[in-house]
Structures are given as C-alpha cells and as structure tokens.
Amino acid sequence: MAKFVVSYVVLFLFCIFQQSNAASASYNVIKFGAKPDGKTDSTQPFLKAWSAACSSASPSTIYVPKGRYLLKATVFRGPCKNKITVQIDGTLVAPTDYRALGNSGYWILFIKVNRVSVFGGTLDAKGAGFWACRKSGQNCPVGARSITFNWANDILISGLTSINSQSMHLVINSCNNVLVRNVRVIAPDQSPNTDGIHVQTSTGVTITGSTLQTGDDCISIGPSTRNMLMSSIKCGPGHGISIGSLGKEFNEGGVENITLTNSIFSGSDNGVRIKSWARPSNGFVRNVVFQNLIMKNVENPIIIDQNYCPNNQGCPRQSSGVKISQVTYRNIQGTSATPEAVTFHCSPSNPCRGIKLQDIKLTYLNTAATSSCKNIGGTSSGVLMPESCV
Ligand SMILES: *[C@@H]1O[C@H](CO)[C@@H](O)[C@H](O)[C@H]1NC(C)=O
C-alpha cells in the first residue's frame, strides 16, 4: 500500500513538473543558425526551428529577435503536435532578385497548420523588381504572395506589417476560424495585383483594426467564403473592399454572411464593390451588410458590377449567372471623386434582389452625387443622397 502511495505521489509531482514545463518550449531562430544581417540565407535555420516546434508535445514559441533575416520561398508544414506561437520582433526580407522566389507563387507558406499565432513582424518582399518586369512586358515568373495560409484552422495574425509584396500580401485559403488584427499593408498604388488580404474558400475569418494601402483590392473575397467580419479597416490607396471577382467558373461556391462595419476609405478606386464575370455560373452572394462607412474622395463608393469581362475575352455578350441578394448598405457617408457615387449594374439574366439602402449621404464637389441602377430590386429608407434608383 505504502509503495502504491509513493508511486502515486511521484506520478503527481511528475505531472506538475510536466505542466509547469508545458508553456516553456521556446525556439530562438538564432540558436538554429539564423543571422540577423539581412544577407545570410536564414531559410534552413527557420525551417529547423519550425520542425522543433512542430514536433513539440507541449505548446511552443518560435522567437525571431530584432534584425533582418533573408528568407527564400519557405513552407511551414503541419499538422503539428501542439499550439505554436511565432513571435517576430525582426523583419523578414526576400532576396533582392525577384526571380529567386521563382514560380512557386508564394514566399512564406503555412500548410495544414492548426492553432498557430503570429505576433508582430515585418515582411519586406521587395516587389519593385517584379512589378518592373511585368510592366516591361517581359517573360516574368507568376509572382509570389508574401504570406499564405492553406488548409489551416484556428489562426491568429496580430500586428504584422507587410511591405511591397510581389503579388497578394496575405492570403487565407481553405481555412476556418482566422483572426487578423492590427495588420498593416503598404505598397504603391500603382503596384499590380498587390491585394492586401485575399480570403477564399474559408469560414469564420475576422479582420479588424487594419490599415491597408496598396495597388489592388485592400481586401478581396473569393468564392466559397462564409461568416466573415471586417471592422475598423482603413483602406486606400487601393481598389477598395471587393467581393469578387466571382463567377469566372460555372461551378462555384457562393459567398454569404459577410459584414463590413466602422471603416474608412481614402482616395481608393472603389469603396464597397461586388464584382462578377459576365459568364454563366451557379455562384451567389447573399446576406451582406456594409455599414457605418466613411468615404473620402472615393471614385466608386458603392458599386455592383456584373459585367466584368477584361479584354473582352471569353465573355462578350454573355450575362452573369451569379445571384446577388440581401445586401444592405447602411449609414455610408462622405465624398465621391466622380459624379456617380452609387452604381448597381446587375445581371440581366439574374437581377439583384433584396438590395437595401438606408441613410446614404455621398456628395460630389459639394453637390449631391448621382446613382445608376440596372436589373435591381430592393428597398430604400432614411436620408438618401444621391436619390435612390433602387
Ligand atoms: C455570420 O457570421 C458571423 C461572424 O461574422 C457569425 O458570428 C454568425 O454566427 C454567422 N451567422 C450565421 C447565420 O451563420
């Protein structure tokens, strides 16, 4: 009996020891050989730190101290045994020659990870060389997205800054339960396809408190996206916040339950936009709320465009199959940079339904702006400037 009690006590103490040890697994990339000089390739040391954290049975932290770390295209692969926190006090820099990221399409890629949190950090992708290549019409690689999460769940990205991505800055693809907060994206307003945050095939994505200044959409939302909340966003320069382009494919998952609230657009090409290809599709957009928004000198503050057909390739004289319904625009105020502040050009074959306008006040050069409607049904209430065409 005494022997049994002793072994029980030993087991108990062992468990306490394990628990107190639980939060302390920490992997500093410097210990794995990373060099904070911005010149030495630190890809392998980062991967070794990841591999140690990923196989740790207890929660672990990967620590990146101050300094600049050169990283090539890098894949952080899961699943891992426990939670991982990546604390970045430094800057990750891409190779100066844009071709070094090759045709992989990504720079930093997380695949099949769960319960990963990334705190802080700056990503400097040095995209200018790649944009220049595209502009000159040479044969260029596809372009790398700076940070991508594929097939990931329970992700937190907090306080990250992304500068000059070659293409999209942050991509959330096939993920569940992602919180993006206090993120900053910075790229010139003429940099091509540098969307700030792109979300698709995902559920439960929240983006809050973020400032997005870039050359394409501040946030773009692709097919099969549900239950997304965006709040306290500052957008501009950029192409605005877009649902779409949708309906490029015939078989496509819809977009539903999307809310954008308490946000500011400054000098952007669009404010809130829904965009679909003029092609047959079984896609849809429904249950969307755009509310409490301020527009400052925005070219198209409110726009639905279902006639997207770039270069008239593969869609002329066709009509969009994407069904848009139950979209609410509430308390949207400010200035339009063009006379037409509200544009609803819906599909002739699939008119927009249940569009609600409430308390809209948009001016152009201190006078009421105008609105234009095609193929739309819905209701309007409250103060409406421009006069509603719904
Ligand atoms: C809509 O999305 C929000 C998250 O933004 C979620 O809390 C809510 O449960 C969703 N509603 C439905 C009906 O799924």
Image (cartoon, rainbow, N blue to C red):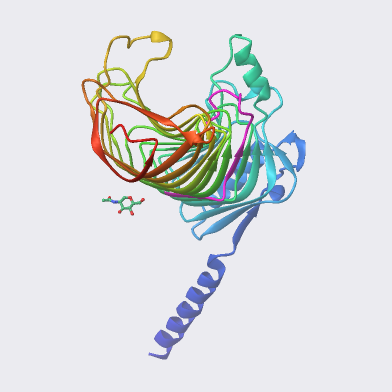
Q: Nearer the viewer, residue 250 or 4?
A: 250
**Image quarter of residue 201:** top left
Residue span colored magenta: 178-195
Q: Farthest residue in the bottom direction?
A: 2
Q: In the picture, which quadrant includes the N terminus?
A: bottom left
Residue 203 in view (yes/no): no
- Residue at x 44%, y 32% (from the top left corner): 369
Q: In the displayed structure, would residue 5 be above or below residue 241?
A: below
- Residue at x 62%, y 58% (from the top left corner): 26
The image position of residue 256, as x and y in percent, is 30, 41
The image position of residue 215, as x and y in percent, is 57, 28
Q: In the picture, which quadrant includes the C terminus?
A: top left
Q: How many callouts does the rendering have?
A: 0
Q: Nearer the viewer, residue 120 or 330?
A: 330
Image side of residue 142 versus residue 224, left or right:
right
**Image quarter of residue 253:** top left
Q: Farthest residue in the front direction?
A: 367
**Is 180 within the magenta?**
yes
Q: In the displayed structure, would residue 297 be above or below residue 203?
A: above
- Residue at x 52%, y 54% (from the top left corner): 84
Image side of residue 196 versus residue 280, left or right:
right
The image position of residue 72, as x and y in percent, is 64, 31
